[in-house]
Image (cartoon, rainbow, N blue to C red):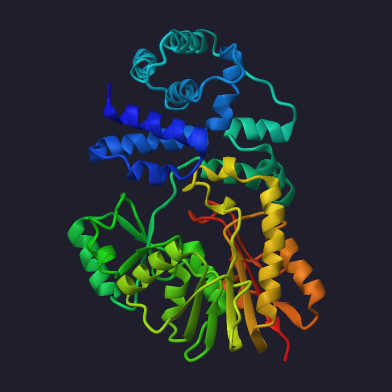
Amino acid sequence: MSPARRAALKILAGWLEAGGDPKQALRGVAGLSAQDRSLVWELVVGTIKKKGRLERFLPLLLQKENPPVTLKAILLLSLFQLEEKKWAEYAVVNDAVELAKAFRLGKLAGVVNGCLRKFLRERPAFSFTDAADELAGTYSYPGWIVEEWLGLFGREKTIRMLAWGNGAPALFVRLNRLKTNEEEFFSFLAKQKFEWEQSLRFLNFYKIRKEISLTDFELLREGKGYIQDPSTSLAVRVLDPHPNEEILDACAAPGGKTALIAESEGKITAVEKSAQRMQVMAGNFKRLGVKGVHLVMGDFLKHSFKQNFDKILIDAPCTGLGTMARHPELRWEKKKEDAVRMGAQALQFLEQAAGLVKPGGIIVYSTCTLTAEENWNACEKFLAGHPEFERESAEAWAGKEFCDTQGNVVILPGEYETDGVFVCRLKRKK
């Protein structure tokens, strides 16, 4: 039996039982070849993304309602290979039985064999309760996300977003102008024979058509390039930082947006409440050549600042639904209540920022999610309670194609091969 399938089962069973970050779990697996590691990730990510759809088969195949977690993981992993990948049936069933034996499931190895053969023999189908449930079952998402997006964006756009989330996300590298230029960047890409494509919509971003890591990409190790989704740059575009402006980044880690702001030579204060994330951010700044940023470890909502700021960026904690293509676990971890709770927290961030920005100053509020509570509703509630602020259309900085009718930046997941984002620019009246 391949070590890849053993590792995939272990990671998937661990995730089913305790949640967490599957990518972090894979990093902890030693002794895998690059090819095996790639196969493990394909199996784990694919099964997690299609978990909702695959789980609908289980009641049609199993008599037990709550099977042991390892048995459930073997069945889901195998159904993914049979239903989604269309891999060789005999090999998949044989591997599944061998996994059950290797993980000491005893007589349950026979249950695995029986369930998978029944699936192949009968190809059971399941019914849907309504149009939203049909999309949830077909594309494998929780019903609340589908209902939220149908209400906001309609069926056609929702289907495109759901499909994008099930695919492999595009990989972009941002050229770091603090340490390099186009000539050096292009020279390295040509030397390494990377296939790449310059983004026409996002300045200094390049799509790389190959999996890369810090260990095998010299420009990343040296901080001349930075793996970053281009959609994240729009919040900085809309912030429009200038030299010598006092700028506060309220939720700064891991520092990608702060590093972009630093190119403007403003006077930046970056706040982060997690010591671990602060350490990661400091390491990123050192590698990227970001200097002169005042780091504050603390909770933005509780910290007492001794100055006011010209501009404040709030990249708010959110449900992250715009990033589900690269974070497969999010769709199952986040609930409707989380969107409501984080929307309320977003309002607290805006309230805190309102007391810190100078007259005539700017607050830019951004998320990487697409729910009404965390985006439009949070900003509307803030404006209703703060007549001293007004919304400014982001068109002048982001461009009309990225903006909704209110002037907020709204990018849907996959619309430009990027994550989904929301950005609102708020100005304090003089």
Q: Quadrant of residue 27?
A: top left
- Position of residue 42 relative to residue 106, above or below, is below
Query: How many numbered circles does the render carry?
Result: 0
- Measured as percent of width and height from the top left, residue 116 is found at 47, 13
Using residue 398 as the reference point, say whether residue 8 is left or right of it: left
Q: Which residue is found at the position 57% from the left and 70% from the top?
A: 299
- Residue 123 at what x, y percent from top left? 54, 13
For the point 39% across and 31% down, the residue is 10
Left or right: 5 as drawn, with respect to 149: left
Side of 405 where 246 appears, left or right: left
Question: Which residue appears at 53% of the width and 87% of the height?
Answer: 246
Would residue 142 be visible to someone looking at this image? yes
Q: Quadrant of the C terminus?
A: bottom right
For residue 426, say whether it is visible.
no
Left or right relative to 340: residue 167: left
The location of residue 321, given as percent across then percent down, is 58, 51
Q: Look at 45% across and 30% down and name the residue there.
A: 13
Above or below: residue 135 compared with residue 125 = below
